[in-house]
């Protein structure tokens, strides 16, 4: 191989940069980006702001649920994906119902806190089981599905590290919030929750990016399936061609014999 055939440092840097860009784009898509963060923070921020001003549970709950519904409508109007907005609506709705039923504004936050704790445990348990949750979430985004489990051990290792990171970060968040749920008032708990919405999330996403940027490239199973289908179609076409050629060769002597017979008769 000549020096021209060898990959240069610039080429390797470009490929690495492309891989990082793909990873960033996939994470951005999977976790909703800036808009997803806004949709996550805004209902809780509105709830605690209104409740801090007037201690009115009903008004705070209606405002939080209303803004969640508006975010979904905006997504639908823009024909954008609504999974992040819908998850926000369900979370807020559970909080509103729970707070109204117990007549305790602090309980608006409890369903979300329980979800965070459950998600933290899911990240850790699935990592221990060899099926890290972050891999299940990001596999389809990277078009690799579950190929990383058996065919790409480097990716599996990265997903396992990322899942542990998510689990530990969310456990740390829960360790702060649950004592506050028992000891602090609604306003204090609400503002701490708002403050802790984004930084732990960004830290977990950044660590995921770090682990995946150093991991082997994903195996595009969709491209493999498409290539296999094309190869199968090509094989069928070749077999049909060969069959037609054989049938044509078999028919030729019959025609020649018939022609020869007519010639002899003449």
Image (cartoon, rainbow, N blue to C red):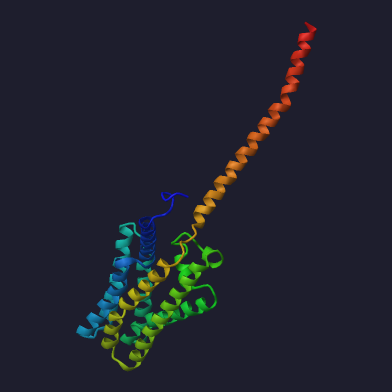
* Front residue (pair 109, 211): 211
Residue 86 in sight from this viewpoint: yes
Q: Quadrant of residue 256?
A: top right
Q: Residue at x 23, y 86 (%)?
A: 55
Give the camera-side residue of 36 and 24.
24
Residue 11 rendering spot, x and y as whole percentages: 38, 55
> Residue 23 versus residue 200: which sits nearer the camera?
23
242 vs 202: above or below:
above
Q: Residue furthest top?
A: 266
Q: Is residue 257 above or below residue 145?
A: above
Does residue 146 appear in this view? no
Residue at the extreme front of the image, as rendered: 2
Q: Residue 92, how many percent across, how many down?
A: 34, 75
Residue at point 49%, 57% (across, down): 220
- Relative to 119, does residue 8 appear above or below in the rendering? above
- Outermost residue to the left: 53
Image location of residue 142, percent across then percent down: 44, 61
């Amino acid at each position: 191989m000549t020096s021209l055939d060898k990959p240069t440092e610039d080429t390797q840097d470009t490929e690495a940069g492309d891989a990082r860009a793909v990873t960033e784009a996939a994470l951005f898509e999977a976790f909703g980006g800036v808009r997803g963060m806004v949709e996550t923070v805004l209902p809780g921020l509105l709830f605690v702001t209104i409740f801090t001003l007037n201690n009115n549970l009903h008004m705070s709950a209606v405002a939080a649920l209303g803004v969640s519904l508006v975010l979904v409508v905006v997504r639908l109007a823009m024909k954008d994906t609504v999974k992040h907005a819908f998850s926000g609506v369900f979370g807020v709705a559970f909080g509103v119902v729970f707070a109204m039923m117990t007549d305790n504004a602090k309980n608006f936050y409890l369903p979300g806190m329980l979800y965070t704790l459950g998600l933290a445990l899911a990240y850790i348990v699935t990592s221990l089981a060899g099926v890290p949750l972050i891999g299940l979430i990001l596999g389809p985004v990277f078009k690799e599905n579950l190929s990383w489990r058996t065919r790409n051990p480097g990716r599996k290792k990265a997903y396992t590290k990322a899942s542990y990171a998510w689990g530990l970060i969310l456990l740390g968040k829960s360790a702060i919030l649950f004592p506050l749920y028992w000891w602090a008032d609604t306003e204090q708990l609400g503002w701490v929750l708002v403050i802790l919405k984004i930084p732990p999330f960004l830290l977990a996403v950044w660590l995921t990016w770090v682990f995946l940027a150093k991991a082997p490239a994903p195996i595009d199973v969709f491209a493999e399936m498409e290539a296999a289908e094309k190869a199968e179609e090509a094989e069928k076409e070749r077999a049909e061609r060969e069959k037609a050629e054989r049938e044509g060769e078999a028919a030729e002597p019959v025609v020649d014999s018939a022609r020869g017979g007519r010639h002899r008769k003449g």
